[in-house]
Amino acid sequence: MAGLPKRHVALGLIRPKKKILGGYFAGEVESVGKDVSKFKKGDQVFGTTKLRLGAYGEYVSLPASYTIVPKPYNLSFEAAAAVPLGGLNALHFLKIANIQHGEKVLINGAGGSIGTFGVQIGKAMGAEVTAVDSTIKEGMLRRIGADHFFDYTKEDFTKSGQTYDVIFNMVAQRSYSDCLKALKHQGRYLMANPRISDMLKSFLTSKFTDKTAIFTFAGEKEEELLELKEMIEEGKIKSIVDKIYSFGQAADAHRRVETEQRLGIVVISAEHNNKVS
């Protein structure tokens, strides 16, 4: 079972070299190698396949050293498959930001896979969270903890006069300079989907101003996935699943992601071969 990442595969010059896509999964261990002691047949796990991909299949073979951990007991396989991509990235960036209780955090692109976890993790860290996304996502974002909401189709948060301790941005087209102006002194600007020009600007910002710009990508570490598992089992965060598609509907699932109409995370599942829920 595979959570669907919003990433374009670029592993071949003409076409992808990998025949089976999918970088994140949840499922049951079917068998293990003779030297593997970490898992046994029947264990329920979730994790990432890294550049091996292959999660859009009924079976996937991975080294035991990969980021694979026991599935949260209180999540279905589909809900667990929706965790690693968004959860690992959101946790990675918000921990780097060293958020303090009571700080104001704005999440731009809050309705996506990273953003929905960002809202919840920010709240779990004690922040006052403002979410930015389209009209249809306001209700969902408020239900998972957003204290405030900007509808970007109607209002530009950078022109509201509000300032924030942390801005977590998933939208590549968002103006770098406008976001910096919306930061408080010693504010942190987190970029999960940066342009090359913004990466270059970030070095100057961090060196010559009292603000910090960060684009360091998530390492997808086992200890971070275990931390997410613990937060899920404690009820602090949860995965927000939009729709579940069968393997045969993978193209429809990708189209659903690209429309930006989804309310949460799109998942592909072997258990849904004949229907979409």
Image (cartoon, rainbow, N blue to C red):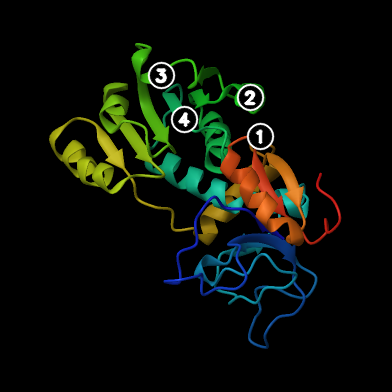
Residue 28 location, x and y as percent? 76, 67
Q: Answer above or below: position of 31 versus 266.
A: below
What kind of element bears circle 3?
Answer: helix
How crowded pointer 4 is (Cα within 10 Å; few <14, some 14-19, many 20+) is rated as: many
Q: Residue furthest left?
A: 208
Q: Are marks 4 and 1 in contact (CB under 8 Å)?
A: no
Residue type at mark 4: give it. Answer: Ile
**Mark 2 lies on residue:** 136
**In the displayed structure, does residue 121 sit left or right of residue 166?**
right
Vertical relation: 241 (above or below) 109 = below
Vertically, is 248 above or below 194? below
**As shown in the figure, which amino acid type bears the numbered disc 1?**
Leu
Report the Cα–Cα distance between label 2 and label 4. Answer: 16 Å
Nearer the N terminus, badge 3 or badge 1? 3
Q: Nearer the viewer, mark 2 or mark 3?
A: 2
Rendering coords of residue 259 (x, y %): 59, 39
Q: Secondary structure at mark 1?
A: loop
Please tell me which of labels 2 and 4 falls first in the chain: 4
Quadrant of image for the C terminus: top right
Q: Residue under label 1, please give it.
A: 263
Quick one: which residue is furthest to the top in this view?
A: 161
Vertically, is 18 above or below 121? below
Distance from label 4 to label 1 (Cα)?
16 Å
Q: CA–CA distance between discs 2 and 3?
A: 17 Å
> For the residues marked 4 and 3, what is the alpha-carbon distance in whole angstroms?
11 Å
Pointer 2 and pointer 1: residues touching (CB < 8 Å)?
Answer: yes
Question: Disc 3 designates what residue?
Answer: 157
Residue for point 34% across, 46% down: 215
Question: How far apart are labels 3 and 1 at the CA level?
Answer: 21 Å
Q: Quadrant of the N terminus?
A: bottom right
Kindly check if marks 2 and 4 are in contact, taking CB atoms under 8 A apart as contact.
no
The amino acid pointed to by label 2 is Ile
